[in-house]
Image (spheres, rainbow, N blue to C red):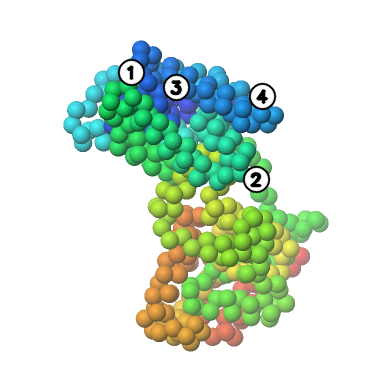
Amino acid sequence: MEKLKRYVIFLIGLFINSLGVSLITKADLGTSPISSIPYVLSLNFLMTLGQFTIIFSILLIIIQLFILRKNFKAEHLLQIPISILFGYFIDLTMVLLGFVHPEAYGFKIIYLLIGCVILGFGVYMEVLANVAMLPGESFVRAVSSTWNTNFGNTKVAFDVSLTVIAAVLSFIFVHRLEGVREGTIIAALLVGFIARLFGRYLAFLKPILFSEPSSAVETAEDGTAVSPVIVIGRQYGSGGHDLGKAIAEKLGYEFYDHEIIQMTAGTTGYTPQFVKEKEENMTNSFLYDLVSQMYIYSDEHDAPRDKIFESEASVIRQLASKGNCVILGRCADYILKDRPCCLKVYMHASEEYRTKRIMSTEQLSEKEAQQKILQNDRRRADNYRYYTRRIWGLAKNYDLTIDTELGEETVIDLVSKTLDRIKAAQPSF
């Protein structure tokens, strides 16, 4: 039943894909990169866009066979009926959209953008179903896995190659650029980006649609409560790192900060320096989604920053399972939101206090310190909002928010007393 549901979702997504391709094509500003070669051929020969799509898809499948050789599995043959169905869907939707003939450039842009949204949603459904891939994406996966290339870069190179070949064919056939226009570039930039947005904002659908193993609440082997964990979010310059370490020493707990970087580097293959530069460092979520959009098509590769976040989340859960520890930053309050006996703390301070502290600890001028505080807080807030869809520093996300200007002794006392209350509410404590 689960498999059937996934295939139904995939087929619906396939039809939506075809509808998006057809509407983009009807906008008369070019078409999507994957359809650019079939479209140019359909403009110059008697066969339809859907028919050329089928032929082109089967060609990609044959090339995959030569690329993968013994790694070409029976499941790859599923692309053949999918390609045929997709081709017929394109021809059907082209007929259904026969009334679409925009004349004004503004209307062409509107139809193009609507088509991109529809196609993006179709791609999202294809990824959500996770049962098969269209030949274009499967071809990129074959190249990437065979020659160990970066999936995102390979996808970009593939789309560019298709567009260039389509343009060359157009000049050969009619001695002018036809079928490849600005709409092709816009579709290349927007479709994956839109699919990625759908994936982020509709993430709640996956557990509703599919019965996946839930992350059970941790308990000890005898059914009693787990050991306590403290997670700390902090404004830059508030002293959260030093206070977290002091709290851990006072309680006799392990303190985890840079150790998380080392463990993440070991699981991702990235260097510790690369992990450190990318973690909690979201400069612009819009640009990040735009750059990382190609990875939406991959069921095996995440964008580097996403991979780091998921790996750090796994490391944090692993460390938390041992209990009796303090974990600093990295959205740990969200990652462990359902864990019992987990004290979530947010540390903040006035800008004046933080500025003076940074000037002293990092030997910076007042202006440099203020700029660094603003920059780091913004990046942490953007990173937190991007991965949790919650507001960084919002009191309701934490058990305790503390002004660190109260002093180390007061902060440690507040955390210790709050932890005692949480422990008292748990079995066996």
Q: Which residue is mark 3?
A: 53
Q: Is residue 142 left or right of residue 107?
A: right
Kindly report the distance in space between the C-alpha atoms of the residues bearing marks 3 and 1.
Answer: 14 Å
Between the residue at mark 4 and the residue at mark 2, the CA separation in whole angstroms equals 31 Å
Near mark 3 (Cα within 10 A), the count class, few <14, some 14-19 or many ≥20, is: many
Upstream in the sequence, badge 3 or badge 1? 1
Three-letter code for the amino acid on which mark 2 is drawn:
Ser
In this rendering, which labeled residue sits more in front, label 1 or label 4? 1
Which residue type carries mark 1?
A: Asn
The residue carrying pointer 2 sits among few (fewer than 14), some (14 to 19) or many (20 or more) residues within 10 Å by Cα, namely few
Q: Nearer the viewer, residue 333 or 419?
A: 333
For residue 44, the mark is 1
Question: Which residue is pictured at 51% across the width and 44% down the height?
Answer: 152
* Amino acid, disc 3: Thr
Residue reaching furthest to the left: 104
Mark 3 / mark 4, whichever is N-terminal? 3
Q: Which residue is mark 4?
A: 74
